[in-house]
Amino acid sequence: MSPLLACHGCDLLTQIPPLPKHGAAYCPRCGSLLMRAKPNSIERSLALVLASIVLFAVALSFPFLAMKSGGFEQQTNLITGVYLLYQQGMEGLATVVLLTCVLFPLLQMTGLLYVLLPVYLKRRLPRAVQVFRFVQHLQPWSMMEVFMIGILVSLVKLAKLAAIIPGISLWAFALLIFTTAAQTAVLDTHRVWVALEASDGTD
């Protein structure tokens, strides 16, 4: 039996037939787009998640920025930047940066890997449904793009005071934003839910 999907426009429950490659399903009552086929969604999402995890590890491990003024040079990475904010009395901002740019993206990537790899292998790990639901809730809280815009603005202002040397971590972080955005675009969440419901495991 074809799965049911609620229309985001009028809440009509509609059975979704198997879609052809690059096909789409529309609500029969209001015409809203219900679902668009995304070929090789699981495989492409899994590859982008693995790439994101590698880029995230690089972004945390190497210098983010270096400032050189006269004979003085100081390097910082993402974690020490958060620590410096905390030391300067900006505890709230340090906590927001730590959560939205480090912890939430890390939980989202590892959670997706936990769900997608077994789905790709036709298996299922315990609590996969809860983990995938948690990952979906985390998505709006990942704000790496906002953090990157803040960094670029700071670079423009600081460039008049000192020489700014971008580190490998900064480039990795920029690529990470693109890979996570691409992963979100190619992931067919409906197919993941169907795969989780059809698997044999129990939660």
Image (cartoon, rainbow, N blue to C red):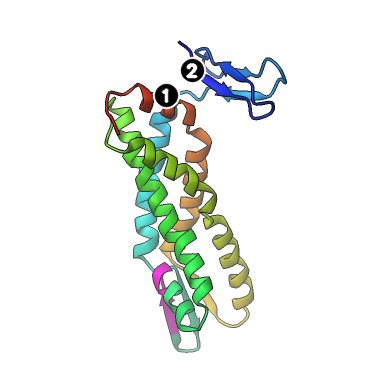
Residue 155 within the segment the image draws in magenta? no
Whether residue 188 can be seen here: no
Q: Camera-side residue: 134 or 116?
A: 134
| 132 sits left or right of 122 in the view | right
Q: Is residue 52 above or below residue 16?
A: below
Give the Cα distance between marks 2 and 1. Answer: 8 Å
| Residue of label 1 | 194
Marks 2/1 in contact by CB < 8 Å: the verdict is: yes
At x 28%, y 30%, the residue is 202
Secondary structure of residue under mark 1: helix
Give, as a three-letter code, the residue at label 1. Answer: Val
Q: Camera-side residue: 2 or 202?
A: 202
Q: Which image quarter is the N terminus in? A: top left
Q: Seen from this angle, which residue lies furthest bottom?
A: 71
At x 39%, y 55%, the residue is 56
Whether residue 111 can be seen here: yes
| 115 sits left or right of 33 in the view | left
Secondary structure of residue under mark 2: loop
At x 34%, y 41%, the residue is 113
| Residue of label 2 | 3
Q: Is residue 162 above or below residue 117?
A: below
Number of residues whose C-alpha sits closer than 10 Å to that of mark 2, classed few (under 14), some (14–19) or many (20 or more): few
Number of residues whose C-alpha sits closer than 10 Å to that of mark 1, classed few (under 14), some (14–19) or many (20 or more): few
- Measured from the top left, where is residue 157 in percent x and y? 64, 75
Q: Which image quarter is the C terminus in? A: top left
Give, as a three-letter code, the residue at label 2. Answer: Pro
- Measured from the top left, where is residue 112 in percent x and y? 38, 41
At x 45%, y 89%, the residue is 71
- In the rendered structure, which segment of residues is drawn in magenta? 73-80
Q: Camera-side residue: 18 or 30?
A: 30
